[in-house]
Amino acid sequence: MNWTERFEETLKTPAIATPDWFECIPAPQRDEAHRLVATGAPVCVKPSKGGCITVLFDDTEFVAGVFQEAIAAEQFAAAWNHR
């Protein structure tokens, strides 16, 4: 993946807690998403079985984002954890 592809991947995943991010969450899970955001729950980065990198809220299975490259996932997580 080149720099441009990495940049585009980052752009297509809205930042956690933005209106666009909430819209990406399936409707039945939005209440949980609002709760996690309201409590400021941190996120962590974990590889998934499909070869992607997943950003999860700590101590949950709630997915905040999925990326092809670890660097994009790390930046996404860091933006939320260091707000």
Image (spheres, helix red, strand yellow):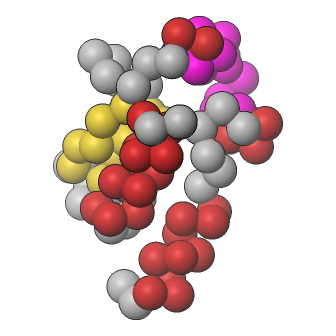
Q: Residue at x 23, y 43 (%)?
A: 46
Identify which residue, 28 or 5, lies in the foreground: 5
Which residues make up the magenta segment? Answer: 22-37
Q: Is residue 73 left or right of residue 17?
A: left
Q: Percent x, y for residue 70?
A: 29, 62
Vertical placement of residue 64 versus 4, above or below: above
Q: Can residue 13 be seen at all in this image of the molecule? A: yes
Quarter occupied by residue 23: top right
Vertical placement of residue 37 versus 22, above or below: above
Q: Is residue 41 magenta?
A: no
Q: What quarter of the picture does the N terminus occupy?
A: bottom left
Q: Residue at x 46, y 77 (%)?
A: 6
Q: Residue at x 78, y 36 (%)?
A: 19
Q: Percent x, y for residue 40?
A: 51, 18
Magenta segment main secondary structure = helix
Q: Which residue is drawn at 42% across and 35% down?
A: 81
Q: Can residue 32 be seen at all in this image of the molecule? A: no
Q: Is residue 62 left or right of residue 29?
A: left
